[in-house]
């Protein structure tokens, strides 16, 4: 074929008619890349991570649903409420009679039982954990006549617990935390007097095998934990006027103990001056009568500034400052007015256990009446009464409320 027969589109120049762009090679390399980058978001690791989160959320939802179901049961079911009331009264009675809460369980339920024991002890409610197997090998001896037994078993058929029951005192009251909704169907109560049996139902909406594909105790132990927590708090409030104070007294360590120290209110007794530490005024010469100068000199030696002209009278620091400005320092203390030397019978009593804030609020309330203002005024001495009903300390009223409040 000659050159004349070659069609134009078949002609290929050996060299480009124009210089190549300096980016030509880069463009060629870009064109050779795959049309789309690898999809890292669909990698096996990412899929496993997603499945991990989905599973975790499902477990949390399952346990949340179990707690909602438990809440609704004790909200709406009269039998469940009656059982809870009886359980609180039973364990409280044991505690008040010097007995203990004996808690028993096996496996994961036993772990929940041990936590229940720890919570009760934190509230000063004496309790002990009894492992059913160890009970059959001598630990039954820890059970006393005034004790109450609490058993935790979701199935209600735990062999170790059922084997232990026949060897317990017949009159020993027993509280059972179990999935059973009716005591008549619970094997734990089969051979015990109904009067000593108390059922605390703790069911779950669906079995753990159905929800999670494995019968691992999860929702069942969560409901048991929540129910025993509720029982412990209800007992604490029934037995103690101030559960918080009791809890802090038994829990001085850790972050809880530190927070208790920081939040502990300052008591009126904390700022009181001990009466026994206040020096009695003695005359510096051979005369029988103490003078204003004697009082001032004694106050100078007093760590608190308080002085006692006698065992039944007292002069507060603010009054010492006032009489120090007198020109007649040789004047007898006996000639000072009753507003300066305060008789013990005129001290206003406040219990030592009151906080400074409580004392302040009480004084403000009392001063709302004219009568209150007559005995709660400037110069008033507050006598701090201890647990033995003795006046152990004193405080000036000005230490509790301000001058502005005293002027109102």
Image (cartoon, rainbow, N blue to C red):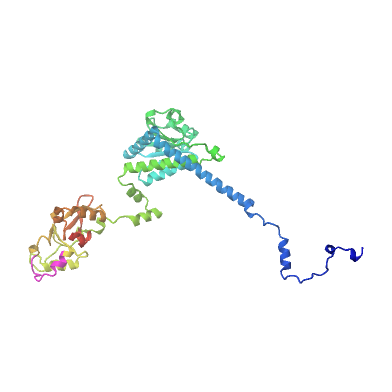
Foreground: 395 or 134? 395
Q: In percent of the image, x 23 and y 56: which residue is there? A: 360
Foreground: 298 or 357? 357
The relative height of residue 280 versus residue 157 in the rendered view (above or below) is below
The relative height of residue 37 versus residue 54 in the rendered view (above or below) is below
Q: Position of residue 118 (x, y in %)?
A: 41, 45
Q: Position of residue 122 (x, y in %)?
A: 38, 47
Q: Residue furthest right?
A: 1
Foreground: 63 or 331? 63
**Does residue 388 appear to the left or right of 89 in the view shown?**
left
Residue 285 position by quadrant: bottom left
Q: In percent of the image, x 37 and y 39: which residue is there? A: 100
Residue 110 appears in the figure: no
**Does residue 242 appear to the left or right of 363 in the view shown?**
right
Q: Position of residue 140 (x, y in %)?
A: 42, 36
Dominant secondary-structure state across the stretch colored magenta? loop
Q: In which quadrant of the rendered image does the C terminus lie? A: bottom left
Foreground: 7 or 287? 7
Q: Which residues are magenta?
A: 319-332
Residue 56 appears in the figure: yes
Q: In percent of the image, x 58 and y 47: which residue is there? A: 51
Is residue 324 on the magenta stretch? Answer: yes
Q: In which quadrant of the rendered image does the N terminus lie? A: bottom right
Q: Position of residue 194 (x, y in %)?
A: 39, 28
């Amino acid at each position: 074929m000659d050159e004349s027969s070659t069609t134009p589109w078949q002609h290929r120049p050996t060299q480009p008619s124009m210089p190549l762009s300096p980016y030509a090679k880069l463009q060629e390399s870009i064109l050779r890349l795959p049309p789309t980058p690898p999809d890292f978001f669909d990698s096996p690791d990412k899929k496993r991570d997603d499945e991990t989160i989905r599973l975790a959320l499902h477990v949390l939802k399952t346990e949340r649903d179990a707690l909602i179901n438990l809440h609704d049961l004790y909200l709406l079911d009269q039998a469940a409420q009656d059982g809870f009331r009886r359980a609180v009264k039973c364990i409280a009675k044991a505690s008040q009679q010097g007995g203990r809460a004996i808690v028993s369980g096996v496996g994961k339920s036993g772990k929940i039982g041990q936590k229940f024991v720890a919570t009760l002890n934190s509230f000063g409610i004496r309790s002990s954990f009894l492992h059913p197997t160890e009970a059959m090998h001598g630990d039954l001896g820890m059970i006393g006549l005034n004790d109450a037994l609490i058993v935790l078993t979701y199935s209600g058929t735990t062999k170790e617990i059922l084997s232990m029951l026949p060897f317990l005192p017949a009159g020993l009251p027993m509280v059972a935390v179990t999935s059973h909704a009716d005591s008549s169907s619970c094997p734990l109560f089969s051979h015990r007097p109904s009067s000593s049996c108390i059922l605390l139902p703790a069911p779950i909406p669906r079995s753990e095998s159905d929800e999670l594909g494995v019968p691992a105790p999860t929702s069942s132990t969560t409901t048991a934990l929540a129910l025993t927590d509720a029982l412990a708090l209800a007992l604490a409030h029934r037995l103690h006027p101030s559960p918080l104070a009791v809890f802090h007294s038994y829990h001085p360590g850790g972050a809880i103990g530190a927070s208790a120290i920081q939040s502990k209110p300052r008591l009126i007794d904390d700022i009181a001056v001990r009466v026994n530490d206040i020096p009695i005024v003695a005359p510096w010469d051979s005369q029988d009568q103490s003078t204003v100068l004697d009082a001032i000199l004694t106050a100078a030696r007093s760590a608190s500034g308080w002085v006692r002209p006698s065992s039944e009278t007292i002069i507060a620091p603010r009054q010492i400052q006032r009489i120090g400005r007198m020109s007649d320092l040789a004047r007898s203390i006996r000639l000072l007015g009753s507003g300066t030397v305060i008789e013990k019978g005129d001290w206003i009593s406040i219990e030592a256990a009151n906080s400074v804030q409580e004392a302040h609020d009480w004084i403000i309330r009392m001063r709302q009446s004219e009568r209150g203002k007559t005995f709660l005024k400037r110069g008033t001495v507050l006598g701090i009464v201890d647990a033995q009903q003795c006046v152990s300390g004193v405080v000036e009223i000005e230490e509790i409320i301000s001058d502005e409040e005293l002027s109102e």
